[in-house]
Image: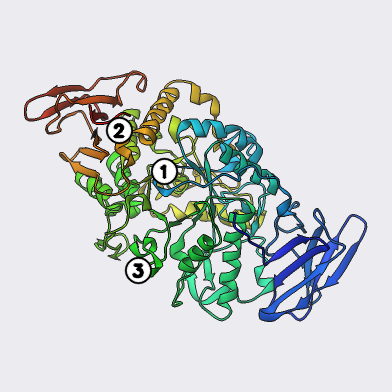
């Protein structure tokens, strides 16, 4: 681990605690130490750039504190490492260097090997804690994922939240455990050979408990707007200090928690007209701070901008990967028939799905009917691993009115076929928790705001769906689950017992088999586009070909059926490896009949499905 020293917050030192906070318009800043018996104040010294700092000898790990600003407050530290009593309470001093790590030999997860598993700590297990997550890590290792992606854990108001209302950006949410509990998650994952990536939100803060404005009026822009209000100030007066604050946050997660990367939420809302974009600076700073291990920076961005993934020397921003939603949208249009909102831009046809897989995304500058303008750029030169694709994620499930998962809206035969496309493609695949066993639980939108704000959230949630035909009737909108209700959160918890029952157990076996093939199959060891093709046979079938080290894998996928697929030449040297209709994976198996001729093979599908072949005699699996 490269040396790094925090420049904001409360840092334990040999002779006390060093406090540093940015408050450029304040004239007097004091640290207020609080205990059950007394409260003491310690003035800090103004330094350059509006930063106040100083060492307090009487302070130490475990002390509660806040900042008094020109007699106002005390307020929680903007860089607080823990908020034991919630986001409105005092901060707690943490000794980040006191944890005993066991991962000195860990080198991270290479982008070429990345298989992501997104999860929400609070609903992933019955207890919903970091400690409970540790118990499930061996399961995730055995499933075949190489990194878990935690939805945001920065502390938020209330006891439950998706995490995108975070306001204490440096402090793990107390409802999941203490900071060392999160460190134990990372340390245990590394012992098992699994990486940990954290979702962070820099484009906005939540509506309750955000005290940044008390410290500085410059955190938010006067020129740029986002769907959540004023944009973060990245390019206006004092924007350099705002940028430094968020970069400090990224460095803190990577170094104080040994995280293997960050997923940057909604980067299209990080509006920056500076000569050097904030994302380029953040990526460069994070990567330069680490030596001897891989740290990945992944963006969520709907714009399909190739420059995000190009090196800074080539005019790009240097990110490693980006969520590429076009594959998800094509598949939902094809399988579930979604056609409103942004789905209106997609046909879901096999030719368009194949094009999406060959390019990484579908929109490369064409006009989007949904947006009313062109969208996307040409992705030439971008490696396939730079595109993160999925069939489900927290947004695409949770932003549905009733939190339905894809497999709850289509039959399992089609779901298995779609999974073959996801896990055999050249892009980086992402699974959403419970997807691997076709979990019956929904993933709903949930919050726990105060009564006044909570009422607005509930009304706003239902109003969002007014434009959709299924919810044009106000009575239909009233049936949308209330985000504020505790039951909405509880209904979203995974029910692990069902993973050992059929048909969920068969679906889990299927995912494990595909992930083992992806991890150990020689044909998957190629890292570029050269060894990958995706071809539409007709409007319903796609053929994927993977080739590396003289080994060839062929996946023939029928997305809508029944039907015949003419797959071209399929000689006797191609051996069948896997079928979605194998009895081990399909409780009601309807085997795919394969006819091999001199010039073509014909596959007879009784329903949607897929068959994977490997060219024999070229290499050992």
Dot 3 and dot 2 residues touching (CB under 8 Å): no
Q: Earlier in the sequence, mark 3 or mark 1?
A: 1
Q: Is residue 597 left or right of residue 560?
A: left
How far from the left and from the top, in percent, is residue 559? 25, 35
How far from the left and from the top, in percent, is residue 41? 86, 69
Picture colour scheme: rainbow
Q: Give whichever of 200, 502 is nearer the camera.
A: 200
Q: Residue at x 79, y 63 (%)?
A: 17
How far from the left and from the top, in percent, is residue 346? 27, 51
Q: Which residue is mark 1?
A: 113
For the question of whether residue 621 can be seen, the reply is yes
Q: Residue furthest right?
A: 37
Distance of mark 3 from mark 2, alpha carbons? 39 Å
Distance of mark 3 from mark 1, alpha carbons? 25 Å
Q: Secondary structure at mark 2?
A: helix
Q: Is residue 437 left or right of residue 30?
A: left
Q: Which residue is mark 3?
A: 314
Q: Split into 4 quadrants, where in the image is the N terminus? A: bottom right
Q: Residue at x 60, y 76 (%)?
A: 218
Q: Split into 4 quadrants, where in the image is the C terminus? A: top left
* Mark 3 closeness class: few <14, some 14–19, many ≥20 residues within 10 Å: few
* Mark 2 closeness class: few <14, some 14–19, many ≥20 residues within 10 Å: many
How far from the left and from the top, in percent, is residue 165? 59, 56
Residue 417 is marked as 2
Q: Residue furthest left?
A: 598
Q: Earlier in the sequence, mark 3 or mark 2?
A: 3
Q: Nearer the viewer, mark 3 or mark 2?
A: 3
């Amino acid at each position: 681990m490269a040396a790094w020293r925090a420049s904001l917050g409360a840092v334990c030192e040999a002779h006390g605690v060093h406090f540093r906070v940015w408050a450029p318009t304040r004239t007097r800043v004091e640290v207020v130490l609080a205990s059950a018996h007394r409260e003491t104040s310690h003035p800090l010294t103004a330094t350059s750039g509006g930063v106040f700092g100083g060492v307090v000898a009487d302070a130490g790990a475990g002390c509660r504190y806040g900042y008094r600003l020109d007699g106002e407050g005390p307020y929680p530290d903007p860089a607080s490492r823990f908020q034991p009593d919630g986001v409105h309470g005092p901060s707690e001093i943490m000794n980040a260097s006191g944890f005993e790590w066991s991962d000195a030999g860990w080198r991270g997860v290479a982008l070429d090997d990345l298989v992501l598993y997104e999860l929400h700590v609070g609903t992933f297990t019955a207890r919903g804690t970091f400690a409970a997550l540790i118990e499930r890590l061996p399961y995730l290792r055995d499933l075949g994922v190489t990194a878990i992606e935690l939805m945001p854990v920065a502390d938020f108001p209330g006891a439950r939240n998706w995490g995108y209302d975070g306001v204490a950006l440096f402090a793990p949410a107390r409802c999941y455990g203490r900071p060392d509990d999160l460190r134990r998650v990372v340390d245990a994952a590394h012992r098992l050979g699994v990486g940990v990536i954290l979702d962070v939100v820099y484009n906005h803060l939540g509506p309750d408990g955000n005290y940044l404005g008390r410290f500085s009026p410059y955190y938010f822009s006067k020129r740029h707007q986002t769907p959540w209000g004023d944009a973060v100030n990245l390019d206006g007066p004092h924007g350099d200090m705002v940028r430094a604050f968020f970069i400090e946050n990224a460095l803190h997660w990577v170094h104080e928690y040994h995280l293997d990367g960050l997923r940057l939420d909604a980067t299209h809302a990080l509006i920056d007209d500076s000569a050097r974009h904030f994302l380029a600076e953040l990526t460069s700073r994070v990567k330069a701070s680490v030596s001897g291990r891989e740290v990945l920076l992944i963006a969520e961005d709907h714009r399909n901008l190739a420059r995000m993934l190009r090196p800074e020397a080539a005019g790009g921003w240097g990110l490693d990967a980006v969520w590429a939603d076009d594959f998800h949208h094509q598949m939902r249009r094809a399988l579930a028939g979604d056609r409103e909102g942004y789905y209106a831009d997609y046909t879901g046809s096999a030719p368009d799905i194949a094009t999406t897989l060959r390019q990484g995304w579908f929109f490369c500058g064409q006009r989007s009917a949904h947006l009313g303008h062109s969208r996307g750029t040409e992705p030439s030169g971008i490696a396939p691993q730079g595109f993160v694709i999925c069939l489900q994620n927290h947004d695409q499930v949770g932003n549905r009115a009733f939190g339905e998962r894809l497999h709850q809206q289509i039959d399992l035969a089609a779901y298995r076929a779609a999974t073959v496309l996801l896990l055999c493609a050249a892009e980086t695949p992402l699974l959403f928790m419970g997807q691997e066993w076709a979990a019956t639980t929904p993933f709903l939108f949930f919050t726990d705001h105060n009564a006044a704000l909570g009422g607005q959230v509930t009304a706003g949630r239902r109003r969002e769906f007014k434009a959709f035909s299924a919810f044009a009737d106000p009575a239909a909108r009233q049936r949308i689950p209330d985000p504020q209700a505790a039951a909405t959160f509880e209904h979203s918890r995974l029910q692990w017992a069902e993973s050992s029952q059929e048909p969920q157990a068969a679906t889990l076996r299927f995912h494990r088999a595909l992930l083992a093939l992806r991890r150990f199959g020689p044909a998957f060891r190629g890292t570029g586009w050269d060894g990958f093709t995706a071809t539409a046979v007709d409007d319903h079938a796609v053929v994927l070909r993977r080739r590396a080290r003289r080994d060839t894998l062929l996946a023939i996928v029928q997305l809508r059926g029944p039907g015949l697929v003419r797959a071209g030449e399929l000689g006797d040297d191609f051996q069948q490896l896997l079928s979605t209709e194998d009895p081990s994976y399909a409780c009601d198996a309807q085997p795919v009949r394969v006819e091999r001729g001199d010039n073509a093979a014909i596959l007879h599908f009784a329903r949607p499905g897929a068959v994977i072949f490997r060219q024999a005699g070229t290499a050992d699996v």
